[in-house]
Amino acid sequence: MTDSNTKNCSPSILSFAKDLPNLCSLAGLLCAVIAIYFVILGNFPAAMIGLLWALFFDWSDGIIARRLKGRNEKQQAFGGQLDSLIDIISYGICPALVLLSWGGFSPWFLPGAFLALAAGVFRLSYFNIFGMESGSSYKGLAIDNNVIILTFVFLFSTEIDKAIFTTFLYIMIVVLAVLNVAPIRTPKLIGRWYYVLIAYAVILSVIYGWQLLPGSN
C-alpha cells in the first residue's frame, strides 16, 4: 500500500470528536480553560471550582472509555494522547498559573511555576512510555493529586495571613513537583475512590461557591 493510499484511509481529525470519552476529555479542558481565566483575573474560588470539575471529567473519561464497547485501537490511542495533553494543562499549567497569579506575577515566582510545569511534563512523558508500575500503582505522585491537594489547601487562603500562606503555597508547589518525579510508588485511586472524588468536588464547589457570594468574606 502506498503512502498516499495510507493517508486516504486515515480517519479525519474531527472524527475523533464524536468519541464519547473524548467529549468528556474536552469538557475537562473547558473547565481547565475556565480555571485559567479566573486565575488570571485573581478570582481564586471560581478557579478552584473549574479545577475541581476538570479533575472530575478527567477521571470520568477513563471510566467511560473502559466501559464503552466497540472502540478500535486508533480511538484508544488517540484518547490516551488527548487525555495526556489535557492533563498538562489542567495539572501543570493551571497550578503554575495559580502560583504566579497569587504572587502578583512577580518574577520571584517564576522558578516555582517552571518547576511545577517541568515536573508535570516529565511525569506525563514517563507515564506515556512506561505506564503504571503495576495494575494499581504509579511511579511518582500522580499529577492529578496536585489539584486534589491544591483545591483543599486554598480553602484556608482567606483564614491565614497572606505572607504565610504565600510562602506555604510556594513550598507546597515545589514539594509536589519533586514528588511527581520522585522514585516512589503511589496508589492509583480507582473503584470507590471515584465516588469519593465526586463528593469531594461537590462539597468543595459549594464551599467555594459560598465564598463567591457578595458579603461572604
Image (cartoon, grey):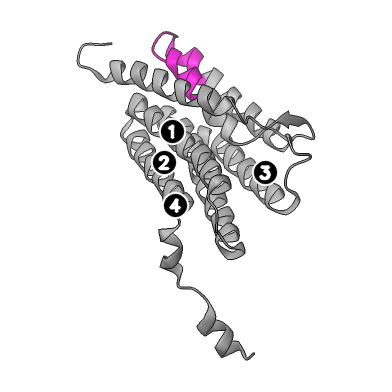
Q: Residue under label 2, please give it.
A: 32
Amino acid type, mark 4: Leu
Callout 2: SS: helix
Callout 1: SS: helix
Q: Residue under label 3, please give it.
A: 123
Q: CA distance from mark 1 to mark 2?
A: 6 Å
User: Looking at the image, is mark 1 or mark 3 earlier in the sequence?
Assistant: 1
User: Looking at the image, is mark 1 or mark 4 earlier in the sequence?
Assistant: 4
Q: Residue under label 1, please give it.
A: 51
Amino acid type, mark 1: Leu
Residue at left offset 50%, top offset 48%: 86
Q: CA distance from mark 4 to mark 2?
A: 19 Å
Instruction: Identify whether 7 is placed above or below 46.
Output: below
Amino acid type, mark 2: Ala
Nearest to viewer (mark 3 / mark 4): 4
Left or right, 3 with respect to 160, comes to right
Q: Residue under label 4, please give it.
A: 20
Residue at left offset 57%, top offset 35%: 144
Dominant secondary structure (helix, strand or loop) of the stretch shown in magenta: helix
x, y percentage for residue 147? 52, 30
Residue at left offset 49%, top offset 16%: 165
Are the residues tagged 1 and 2 within 8 Å (C-beta)? Answer: yes
Residue at left offset 72%, top offset 38%: 181
The stretch in magenta equals 150-166
Q: Quadrant of residue 5?
A: bottom right
User: Looking at the image, is mark 2 or mark 3 earlier in the sequence?
Assistant: 2
Are the residues tagged 1 and 3 within 8 Å (C-beta)? Answer: no
Residue 71 shows in this picture: yes
Q: CA distance from mark 3 to mark 4?
A: 26 Å
Task: Between residue 193 and residue 125, name the one nearer to us.
Answer: 193
x, y percentage for residue 188? 67, 32
